[in-house]
Image: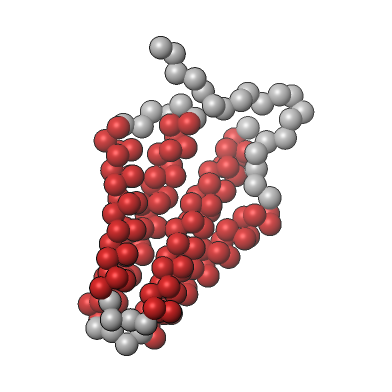
Amino acid sequence: MEQQSFQQPQQPGQKNNQPSAAFIGAAWLALCTGVLAFIIGLWNAEMELNEKGYYFTVLMFGLFAAISLQKAVRDQLEGIPVTNLYYSIAWFSTILCIVLLSVGLWNATLERSEKGFYAISFVLSIFSAIAVQKNTRDQKQAKNQ
């Protein structure tokens, strides 16, 4: 069975899929906002240093896992070979970091508003990291055409 490619060939005179400057700026702004809010929240939190380290590590792991997953999914869609092992590890890592943050916040002795703050900052950071990765790849691809 032949594998179909989702990428359409570019017609002469057709514009490429380069993201707009506004979208690039918004993605970077969202990433910086999410990460800085999370880190400032940790800095000001009244918790043990090891607990702060746990949440910081989960954030960094989550950013890496989400970017890795985005790359693996896009590679597959573009017909670039991705091993099933790597694809599975990327999904597992992304899900694991979300579970680790959820369990940590569930068991934390924080106010609900603080828990919500960390959860929203984390989700904003993960989502915007994916958008920044997508924009970076689209820009590079547009330059190569």
Q: Classify the position of the C terminus by image quarter.
A: top right
Rendered view: 143 above or below 54: above
Work out whether residue 10 or residue 128 is closer to the camera in this orientation and state it: 128
Relative image position of residue 134 (x, y in whole percent):
53, 46
Image coordinates of residue 20 in percent, x first then y, are 68, 50
Outermost residue, top side: 1
Asked whether the viewer can see residue 98, the reply is yes
* Residue at 61 percent of width and 25 percent of height: 8
Left or right: where 96 falls relative to 12: left
Q: Residue at x 63, y 60 (%)?
A: 25
Q: Judge left or right: residue 72 versus residue 104.
A: right
Q: In which image quadrant can residue 107 be found?
A: bottom left
Query: In this rendering, would 24 be left or right of 65?
Result: right
- Quarter of the picture containing the N terminus is top left
The correct choice, above or below, for 93 with respect to 54 in the image is above
**Relative height, residue 75 to residue 25 (above, below):** above
Task: Choose top left, top right, bottom left or bottom right for residue 15.
Answer: top right
Which residue occupies the foreground of this view, 89 or 143?
A: 89
Return the x and y of residue 121 as percentages of the image width and height: 46, 69
Look at 66% across and 26% down and name the residue there.
10
Between residue 24 and residue 110, name the one nearer to us: 110
Kindly identify the residue that appears in the image at 26 percent across and 35 percent down: 85
Chosen colour scheme? secondary structure
Residue 136 visible from this viewpoint: no
